[in-house]
Image (tube, rainbow, N blue to C red):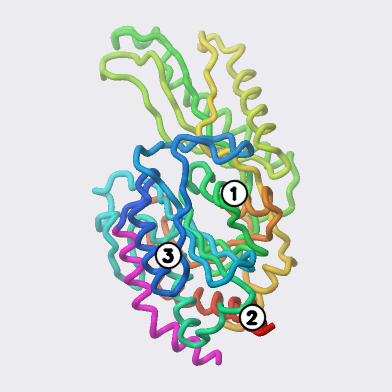
């Protein structure tokens, strides 16, 4: 069976790559995800999944636990896409992926246009190829091979779902809303994030804040006498970096032992001024801050506010206290045990497919796995392809890794679904 399965996966690989090209060629930055979701819905339909479009409210938080509205509300109706196998029982397993991608800054820096899929050197390039449309191709490839070899596999009492969500990159409201409002959960969840064919067990907490720093508008001739709010904002960011670096030394977390800088502070955007020869009056800086798993998002926010207040209170350059606003991700840290049944089953499938031990790891970032683990108490882990330069220029996914990952996923699905039939 193993050889036959692998040969079938190889036979359908080109179809999966063509599907990935269609996904990449449908730009899906936040607020513009629907065309790519329709590509996914069409693919699910060809696999005989029942396709459901789940309404996604615009400009509202997912529920009281989230408290964060979408970062960029869209005037057009929005939805998420769920595919399910036959039956009305609760889902046994859910595959999850996010269809939203981050913007492609400075397209001229890319070797090929970011929203036009391009193949070279065994990779596919384009925004979202790695993070994480390649995961959808991996999942579809495994399912198409199993449809050929075991057409009755998903017709028993155990049911499979495949969910494409939005806003993973900025709020996490997509997965939270699907579970809390539409009941889309399962006994276990595999998120097809790019993990270099390892299992991502967990991540740190992540908080997005906007710093509004006020200075004194003036002519450039007086710049040596004026406090520039951009420079003040950078001073705060530098202090936050030192503070977060110290957290790694003072807050113990054995799961992050191999992560060199778990609580990174990233300055994502800066907006200030309207004239080169004028000192800006106000600067707005958007900042991403990592925090320990042992902290709740509310506690992390209170600590950030307290640190910024104490840092600027006795600094005469800050005539006005900086304004701190939460703007997007408000994500608690999370982890799943490497000895859990879900991770153990993935390890068995990976070893059978590749003859090697599955690599498990934790990162100084976050995924929607946290929602299943923290909010719904559902085991969840990430397994996916090999990617490069995610969120960067010339993002790509290794095409062979999509095949290799599909080999593991197909075995995992066989083990989970084949023993139970519709006659039981």
Q: Give the residue pinned by disc 1.
A: 364
Contact between marks 1 and 3 (CB within 8 A): the answer is no
Residue range of the region highlighted in magenta in the rendering: 1-25
Q: Position of residue 388 (x, y in %)?
A: 43, 60
Gap in Å between the C-alphas at discs 2 and 3? 23 Å
Q: Position of residue 272 (x, y in %)?
A: 36, 22
Is residue 5 shown in magenta? Answer: yes
Contact between marks 1 and 2 (CB within 8 A): the answer is no
Q: Residue at x 52, y 17 (%)?
A: 322
Q: Give the residue pinned by disc 3.
A: 134
Q: Quadrant of residue 309?
A: top right
- Rendered view: 120 above or below 63: below
Assign a secondary structure to mark 2.
helix
Is residue 93 shown in magenta? Answer: no
Q: Give the residue pinned by disc 2.
A: 415
Assign a secondary structure to mark 1.
loop
Q: Earlier in the sequence, mark 2 or mark 3?
A: 3
Q: Position of residue 101 (x, y in %)?
A: 40, 51
**Viewer-nearest residue: 18 or 235:** 18
């Amino acid at each position: 069976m193993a050889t036959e399965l692998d040969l079938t996966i190889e036979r359908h690989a080109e179809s999966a790559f063509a599907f990935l090209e269609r996904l990449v060629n449908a730009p899906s930055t936040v607020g513009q995800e629907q065309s790519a979701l329709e590509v996914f819905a069409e693919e699910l339909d060809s696999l005989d999944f029942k396709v459901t479009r789940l309404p996604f409210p615009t400009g509202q938080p997912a529920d009281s636990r989230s408290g964060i509205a979408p970062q960029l509300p869209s005037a057009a109706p929005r939805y998420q896409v769920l595919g399910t196998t036959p039956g009305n029982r609760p889902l046994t397993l859910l595959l999850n992926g996010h269809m939203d991608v981050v913007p492609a800054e400075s397209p001229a820096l890319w070797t090929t246009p970011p929203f036009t899929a391009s193949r070279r050197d065994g990779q596919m390039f384009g925004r979202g190829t790695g993070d994480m449309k390649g995961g959808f191709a991996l999942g579809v490839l495994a399912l198409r091979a199993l449809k050929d070899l075991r057409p009755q596999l998903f017709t028993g009492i155990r049911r499979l779902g495949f969910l494409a969500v939005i806003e993973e990159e900025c709020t996490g409201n997509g997965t939270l809303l699907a579970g809390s409002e539409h009941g889309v959960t399962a006994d276990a969840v595999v998120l097809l994030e790019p993990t270099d064919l390892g299992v991502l067990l967990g991540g740190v907490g992540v908080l997005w804040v906007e710093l509004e720093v006020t200075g004194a508008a003036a002519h450039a001739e007086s710049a040596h006498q004026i406090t520039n709010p951009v420079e003040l904002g950078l001073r705060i960011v530098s202090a936050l970096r030192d503070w977060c670096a110290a957290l790694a030394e003072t807050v113990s977390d054995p799961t992050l032992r191999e992560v060199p800088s778990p609580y990174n502070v990233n300055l994502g955007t800066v907006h200030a001024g309207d004239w080169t020869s004028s000192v800006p009056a106000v600067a707005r800086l958007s900042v991403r801050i990592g925090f320990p798993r042992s902290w709740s998002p509310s506690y992390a926010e209170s600590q950030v506010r307290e640190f910024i207040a104490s840092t600027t209170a006795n600094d005469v350059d800050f005539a006005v206290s900086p304004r701190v606003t939460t703007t997007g991700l408000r994500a608690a840290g999370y982890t799943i045990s490497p000895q859990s049944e879900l991770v153990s089953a993935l390890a068995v499938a990976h070893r059978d497919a590749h003859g090697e031990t599955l690599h498990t790891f934790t990162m100084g970032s976050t995924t929607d796995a946290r929602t299943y683990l923290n909010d719904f108490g559902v085991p969840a882990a990430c397994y996916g392809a090999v990617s490069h330069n995610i969120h960067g220029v010339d993002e790509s996914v290794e095409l062979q890794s999509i095949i290799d990952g599909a080999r593991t996923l197909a075995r995992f699905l066989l083990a989970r679904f084949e023993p139970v039939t519709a006659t039981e």
